[in-house]
């Protein structure tokens, strides 16, 4: 296999992003899920936090994780996001899909 081979293993990364603003009660989590369906190699979750923020943890190939987070940042809820704080984290490989969680 070569680096250009689509079957070659791709480097896995993980990123936790906290979105602050009017991101609860506006369908933000379900929009994230819809975007995630476009990136089947990305696993993780989206969840509401008690302080009114929303957290996304995305894990998968770097290009796909970046593309998912870019789609969320510029999607239909962009105007509701006041701040997004991204933090790289160690990938765990413990997710089998991308879901809404509590």
Image (cartoon, rainbow, N blue to C red):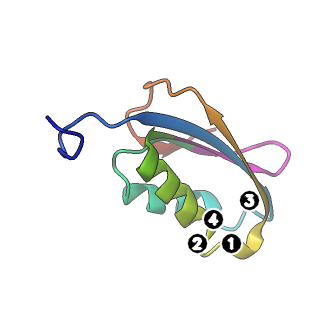
In the rendered view of the protein, which quadrant contains the N terminus? top left
Badge 3 density bin: few <14, some 14–19, many ≥20, Cα 10 Å: some
Q: Which residue is mark 1?
A: 78
Upstream in sequence: badge 3 or badge 4: 3
Upstream in sequence: badge 1 or badge 4: 4
Where in the figure is residue 34, as x and y percent of width and height?
Answer: 45, 62
* CB under 8 Å between discs 1 and 4: yes
Spatial distance from mark 2 to mark 3, Cα to Cα?
15 Å
Q: Which mark is residue 73?
A: 4
Q: Which residue is mark 2?
A: 75
| Residue shown at the point (21%, 47%) measured from the top left | 4
Where 93 falls versus 23 (above or below)?
above
Question: Is disc 4 placed on a helix, strand or loop?
Answer: helix
* CB under 8 Å between discs 4 and 2: yes
Task: Give the image quarter of residue 2.
Answer: top left
Q: Main secondary structure of the magenta part?
A: strand
| Residue shown at the point (63%, 62%) measured from the top left | 28
Where 56 falls versus 72 (above or below)?
above
Spatial distance from mark 1 to mark 3, Cα to Cα?
13 Å
Depth check, mark 2 against mark 3: the one in front is 2
Taking the image as shown, residue 79 lies to the left or right of residue 12, namely: right
Return the residue nearer the eye: 49 or 86.
Answer: 86
Spatial distance from mark 3 to mark 4, Cα to Cα?
15 Å
Q: Which residue is mark 3?
A: 24
Spatial distance from mark 4 to mark 2, Cα to Cα?
6 Å
Badge 4 density bin: few <14, some 14–19, many ≥20, Cα 10 Å: some
Residue 2 colored magenta?
no
Task: Give the image quarter of residue 32.
Answer: bottom right
Depth check, mark 1 against mark 3: the one in front is 1
């Amino acid at each position: 296999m070569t680096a250009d081979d689509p079957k070659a293993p791709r480097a896995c990364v993980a990123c936790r992003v906290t979105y602050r603003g009017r991101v609860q009660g506006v369908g933000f989590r379900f929009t994230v899920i819809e975007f995630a369906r476009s990136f089947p190699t990305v696993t993780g979750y989206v969840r509401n936090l008690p302080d009114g923020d929303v957290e996304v943890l995305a894990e998968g190939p770097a290009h796909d994780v970046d593309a998912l987070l870019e789609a969320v940042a510029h999607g239909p809820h962009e105007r509701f996001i006041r701040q997004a704080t991204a933090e790289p984290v160690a990938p765990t490989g413990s997710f089998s899909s991308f879901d809404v969680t509590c």
